[in-house]
Every structure is written in C-alpha cells, then in structure tokens.
Amino acid sequence: MKELLEYIAKALVDEPDMVSVNEVEGEHSIILELKVSKEDMGKVIGRQGRIAKAIRTVIKSAAVKENKRVEVDIIQ
C-alpha cells in the first residue's frame, strides 16, 4: 500500500524527491500520511479535491483485496 501511494504521488508532482509516505498502524486500520512540497500540494489535491479522492479510492480498492482498512491523509 505504502509503495503504491508513493508511486502515484511521485508521478503527479514536480519534485518527486520531496514525496514521503509514513505508515501508522492502528488496531483496526492503517493510516498512510502523504507529505509533498508546498508547491506540489495543489497537484496532489486537485480541483475540489478530485485527485485526492481518486488516490484514496485506488488505495482503498487495493486494501480491500488484502482485507485491510486504509486511510490516506495528505499533510504539510
């Protein structure tokens, strides 16, 4: 999951070296924290959050195959 999110984010941004994904495991779910540079924040979120929603959908779909619950947070 972490690698998939990192791959998608690096493909979208201008500065792929600034992309980092932190994985936090809880009791019932996994939280993936995506961090990008300030300049690339708009590219990851998209207009009205469409790209962020699409990223979350892809990650959740991959998680369902592994019977896991995943949440994606985009942080600065």
Image (cartoon, rainbow, N blue to C red):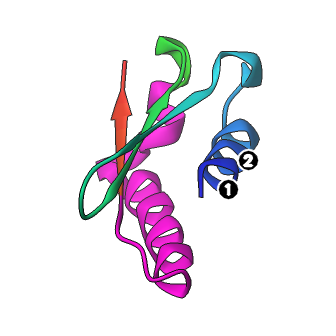
Indicate the secondary structure of the residue bearing disc 1: helix
Indicate the secondary structure of the residue bearing disc 2: helix
Q: Position of residue 66 (x, y in %)?
A: 54, 80
The amino acid pointed to by label 1 is: Leu
- The residue singled out by tag 1 in the image is 4
- The residue singled out by tag 2 in the image is 7
Figure quadrant of residue 70: bottom left
Depth check, front residue: 54 or 23 = 23
Q: Which label is found at residue 59?
A: none
Position of 1 compared to 74: left or right? right
Q: Residue at x 35, y 70 (%)?
A: 69
- Mark 1 touches mark 2? (CB < 8 Å): yes
Depth check, front residue: 53 or 70 = 70
Q: Residue at x 27, y 50 (%)?
A: 26
Q: Residue at x 24, y 57 (%)?
A: 27
The amino acid pointed to by label 2 is: Tyr
Q: Residue at x 67, y 41 (%)?
A: 12
Quadrant of the frame with the N terminus: bottom right
> What's drawn in magenta, residue-wise?
41-70
